[in-house]
Image: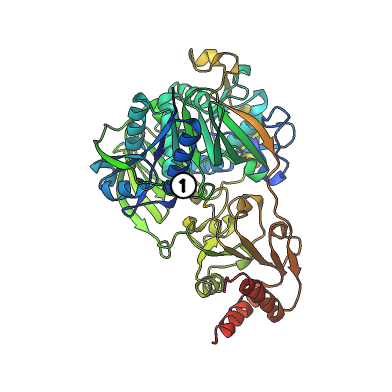
């Protein structure tokens, strides 16, 4: 099986240093960069699928020039090569452009499955995989908690998380799947993997390599951030250090005062 | 051209979801502020009931009978209806930011190239279009965004816009279904997990077990307090990843957004990822052994203690006050 995985570099949520710059765009210098968490689950699922069924995992990233740093981390886990879409005209790209560009890059690669994260930790719009599927005219299987391809039958089944539990859904391949944490934790890179990643190919693609009319001229994006502000904070409350029974009484008093018990 | 704002409804178990009524309210208020009009869309195998519910919020509701959504994922079908309505003069589309809603929005962006204002928790009409407020970067920043063209899409987070019925009920018009916009995956089975019948979003009290609960058995104290307080059990990403609780219970940026009257967190550290999903709660109480747990920053009452001591003591206290 050929599996293409969308991997986006995002500011490391664990570092807690994410911020917007004066232009209301992400301040990329403020925070270390990692592969988006849900994309890591997608990558792990892809690696397990090719271990079970044979084939290759290729990663596809749209990012500034230094995006290759996080791509190397994904290659160290076992992806065989990377496609790096990078172009100055894509700085600050909106969702429609991102979707068109990723779809155009994906269309140049043969694949059975295209995997991406359910959403990203920075923007969290959660619409990219669906948009890429629509651009490519392929079925979308979203919110995957398990992926079971049947290469002989040319179909794939996905356990799709629902508000109640899950739905078992199926579609013909090629197909697009959005991936969740329920697929299981990603592996750690081995030293051998890290060494191997150094020599793995990352092919660079500019907008011109992908086709015409993918991005509007002069960054005329469909949406713009007009203002940003710090998040609303709640006033800190009271701290109780009393023994359990006394603490329980204080909580109960507090609840009773507010008619919550 | 006056704005024509469409609210896309979602149906669960034959009824409109609460988020759908919030999306409808937002569409109506944006339309009123813009001098335009609003309408609603229900796509379902049996749309009549939910369409009538939606008409309490909007002057006009289109009820599309689509047998296909009973056996296929809805996004390709709903996106096809919305795409048709965009061709008929709809300028803006409000969609709930659920899994299906995001699939619908993404599909529409792919098909139409329209801009998306994602994850709005409020929106107002300013000048010639809507301005939305969204929490981004995992809760570390808030942005206000607008469209640069005269039409586009909004996904709405739950709980941001209180649902308010219109002064007068609207009309319902039946419609034939359009062909799906893109190939739709087939639904082979729908599996409900235990405890999933009570909605987290609708609960007045949510009792959450975090990493500190330590094991599936440890959730007994969470379950007990939830049932005693008339609440629902929620979870953090850590307790879901550990396999102690199903994913459907997860609260946070990835997961559900809750705004209960009471949030009681046991062994919850309060990572930003989680706080994004619960800091709108009216009252927040947290019990944690770690005095430095970040949940203290948002808790009205922060109890430094062992949840396996304080939890049962609180259960006993509540029982005692109720007379046994």
Check the image and report above or below for B212 versus B93.
below
Query: Is the residue marked by circle 1 packed among few (<14), some (14-19), or many (20+) residues within 10 Å?
Result: many
- Residue A93 visible, this orientation: yes
**Chain on which label 1 sits:** B
Q: In x, y percent, where is residue A52?
A: 43, 44
* Secondary structure type for disc 1: helix
Q: Write the residue at 64% across / 29% down.
A: A226
Position in image of residue A167 (x %, y %): 36, 51
Residue A49 visible in image: no
Q: In this view, does B124 lie above or below B279?
A: above
Image position, residue B255 (x, y; %): 52, 51
Residue toward you, B31 or B227: B31
Tell me the quarter of the picture where residue B67 sits: top left
Out of B215 and A22, give the one closest to the viewer. Answer: A22
Q: Report which quarter residue B178 is drawn in.
A: top left
Outermost residue, front direction?
A: B167
> Mark 1 sits on what residue?
B22
Q: In which quarter of the image is the N terminus of chain A?
A: top left
Above or below — where is B36 with respect to B68? Answer: above
Residue shown at 46% from the left, 34% from the top: B31
């Amino acid at each position: 099986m050929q599996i293409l995985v969308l991997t986006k570099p995002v500011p490391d949520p664990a570092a807690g240093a994410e911020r917007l710059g004066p232009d209301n765009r992400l301040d990329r210098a403020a925070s270390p960069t990692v592969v988006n968490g849900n994309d890591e689950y997608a990558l792990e699922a892809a690696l397990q699928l090719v271990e079970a069924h044979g084939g290759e995992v290729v990663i596809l990233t749209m990012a500034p020039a230094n995006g290759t740093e996080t791509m190397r981390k994904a290659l160290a886990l076992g992806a065989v090569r990377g496609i790096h879409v990078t172009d100055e005209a894509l700085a600050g790209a909106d969702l429609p452009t991102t979707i068109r560009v990723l779809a155009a890059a994906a269309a140049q690669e043969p694949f059975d499955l295209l995997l991406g994260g359910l959403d990203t930790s920075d923007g969290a719009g959660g619409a990219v995989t669906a948009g890429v599927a629509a651009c490519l005219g392929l079925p979308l299987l979203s919110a995957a908690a398990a992926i079971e391809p049947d290469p002989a039958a040319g179909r794939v089944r996905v356990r799709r998380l629902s508000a109640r539990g899950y739905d078992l859904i199926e579609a013909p391949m090629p197909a697009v799947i959005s991936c969740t944490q329920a697929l299981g934790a990603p592996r750690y890179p081995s030293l051998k993997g890290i060494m191997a990643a150094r020599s793995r190919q990352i092919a660079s693609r500019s907008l011109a390599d992908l086709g015409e009319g993918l991005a509007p001229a002069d960054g005329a994006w469909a949406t713009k951030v007009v203002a940003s502000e710090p998040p609303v904070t709640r006033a800190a409350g009271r701290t109780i250090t009393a023994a359990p029974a006394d603490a329980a009484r204080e909580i109960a008093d507090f609840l009773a005062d507010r008619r919550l018990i | 051209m006056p704005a024509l704002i469409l609210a896309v409804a979602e149906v669960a178990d034959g009824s409109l979801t609460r988020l759908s009524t919030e999306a409808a309210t937002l569409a109506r208020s944006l339309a009123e502020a813009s001098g335009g009009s609003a309408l609603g869309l229900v796509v379902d195998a049996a749309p009549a009931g939910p369409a009538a519910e939606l008409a309490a919020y909007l002057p006009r509701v289109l009820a599309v009978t689509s047998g296909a959504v009973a056996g296929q994922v809805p996004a390709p079908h709903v996106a096809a209806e919305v795409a048709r309505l965009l061709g008929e003069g709809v300028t803006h589309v409000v969609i709930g930011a659920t899994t299906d809603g995001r699939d619908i929005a993404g599909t529409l962006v792919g098909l139409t190239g329209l801009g998306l204002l994602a994850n709005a928790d409020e929106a107002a009409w300013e000048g010639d279009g809507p301005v939305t407020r969204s929490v981004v970067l995992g809760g570390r920043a808030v942005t206000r965004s607008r469209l640069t063209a005269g039409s586009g899409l909004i996904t709405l987070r739950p709980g941001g816009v209180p649902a308010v019925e219109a002064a007068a009920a609207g009309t319902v018009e039946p419609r034939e279904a359009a062909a799906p916009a893109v190939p739709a995956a087939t639904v082979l089975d729908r599996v409900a997990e235990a405890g999933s019948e009570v909605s987290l979003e609708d609960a007045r009290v949510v009792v959450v077990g975090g990493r500190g609960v330590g094991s599936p058995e440890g959730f007994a104290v969470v379950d007990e307090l939830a049932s005693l307080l008339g609440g629902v059990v929620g979870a953090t990403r850590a307790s879901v990843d550990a396999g102690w609780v199903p994913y459907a219970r997860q609260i946070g940026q990835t997961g559900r957004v809750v705004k209960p009257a009471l949030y009681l967190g046991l062994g919850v550290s309060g990572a930003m990822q989680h706080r994004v999903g619960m800091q709108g709660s009216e009252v927040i109480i947290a019990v944690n052994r770690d005095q430095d747990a970040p949940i203290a920053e948002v808790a009205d009452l922060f109890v430094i203690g062992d949840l396996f001591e304080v939890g049962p003591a609180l259960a006993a206290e509540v029982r005692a006050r109720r007379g046994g």
